[in-house]
Image: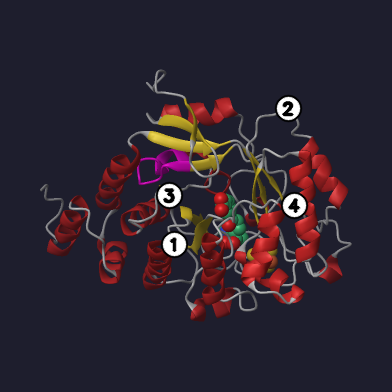
Amino acid sequence: MPTFTKDTTLNNIAEKVYQNQRLSFDEGVYLFKHAELGFVGSLANYIREQKHGNYTYFNKNFHIEPTNICVFDCKFCSYSRAIRERSTYDAWEMSEQDIYDKIKSYEGKNVTEVHIVGGVHPKMGLHYFATLIKNIKTIRPDIHIKAFTAVELEYMCRKAGVSYEEGLQLLKKAGQNSLPGGGAEIFNEEIRSQICKDKCSSEEWLQIHETAHRLNMPSNATILYGHIESYEHRVEHMERLRNLQDQTKGFNAFIPLKFRNTGNDMAHVPECSVIEDLRNYAISRIFLDNFSHIKAYWPMIGRNIAQLSLAFGVDDIDGTVDDSTKIYTMAGAEEQTPVMTTEQIIELIKQVGRNPVERDSVYNIIKDYGMETCPA
Ligand code: V47
Ligand code: SF4
């Protein structure tokens, strides 16, 4: 077994990784507190290549954000507007027809997924969204609909007076296929009460994902990191996800989201460094042994760091995205026009010596692009 460092605890952790053994909470925290980027990077890359070789996944998708009107007031959110601000220039509410027109604008284009999330609008409820999903599926029967964070779902179900199971069953019957990973933020309730106090609790977030998995609706999971949380909070968050994944196996990907501080009530909190972003990807890859995929969301982190992340445990960079709306751009994300053509995404992956693979929303391979034109 190679020795990486003089630190015996780190060497023991490395040995566990090479023997496919699960790390404990304390070991996860130890990595965050004591391991350098090179150390965690090489362990994460080992796991990534064990699981996926050189494959780097992406899909052809686009986003719809029906509204940024929101009943909640998360301190880190740059994009939501209260209902009383609905007539201000930067608030929007798409009509049903706007949404159908957007779906129709992709006619003849071989996108495979639409990602629908937005603010939690007081007037757009469960039955409204069930009809919307049903009509989208009529217009575009082949498309995979990944929609509604657990935060939106908790509110919809509560307002409609139905259980999570009843609400999700209705949406599934209408044509919703899976759930995105948003709204998880940081599960620790003390931190949650400081950054997003009104919205669904960590327990509710986990219950909704557990219910979805039971109904055969897979989902993703996120973490919002790099603000006022501690390393213990990050590991606690991942441990709770790892426990649920042991039970359900319903999570596809884990998506770390870097806190961005432009235009929100946490603008005084500095953003973390690129080194910390990469360490966070790597430690996620090492700790979440039962998650198949770690995703770098390139519109948020930028194309260059997304490329770098592929050497630090990441195997998925989301998709072509075509996001004309604003959740990240308003928070200061790298990409002001988050859209890449398939050719650009393939080039981005090949440039760093990885093998681009187009996938569908549940990671069936659609096309393997090989590695024939590798970088200089
Ligand atoms: O939950 C909001 C985050 C999330 C900020 O499942 C911010 O494939 C950083 O979850 N700085 C929603 N992050 C988006 C999301 C997502 C994105 C891409 C793919 C998938 C998927 C899911 O956006 C929110 C919140 O954590 N967010 N504001 C901010 N200032
Ligand atoms: Fe609303 Fe989501 Fe923004 Fe929170 S993060 S205020 S729930 S849109």
Amino acid at circle 1: Thr
First reached walking from the N terminus: tag 4 or tag 2: 2
Considering depth in this image, is 206 or 230 the residue closer to the camera?
206
Name the disc covering residue 248, or none.
1
Magenta stretch containing residue 306, yes or no?
Answer: yes
Q: Name the residue beneath numbered marker 4.
A: 133
Name the disc covering residue 294, or none.
3
The mark tally for this picture is 4
Give residue 28's position: percent from left, percent from top: 30, 65
CA–CA distance in space, label 2 to label 3: 31 Å
**Within the image, what quadrant is residue 79 found in?**
bottom right
Q: Residue at x 35, y 46 (%)?
A: 312
Instruction: Please rate how many residues cluster around mark 4, counting C-alpha atoms within 10 Å: few if below 14, some from 14 to 19, many from 20.
Output: many
Residue 264 is at least partly visible in this image? no
**Within the image, what quadrant is residue 340 found in?**
top right
First reached walking from the N terminus: tag 1 or tag 3: 1
CA–CA distance in space, label 1 to label 3: 18 Å
Instruction: Please rate how many residues cluster around mark 1, counting C-alpha atoms within 10 Å: few if below 14, some from 14 to 19, many from 20.
Output: some
**Within the image, what quadrant is residue 69 found in?**
bottom right
Q: Secondary structure at mark 3?
A: strand
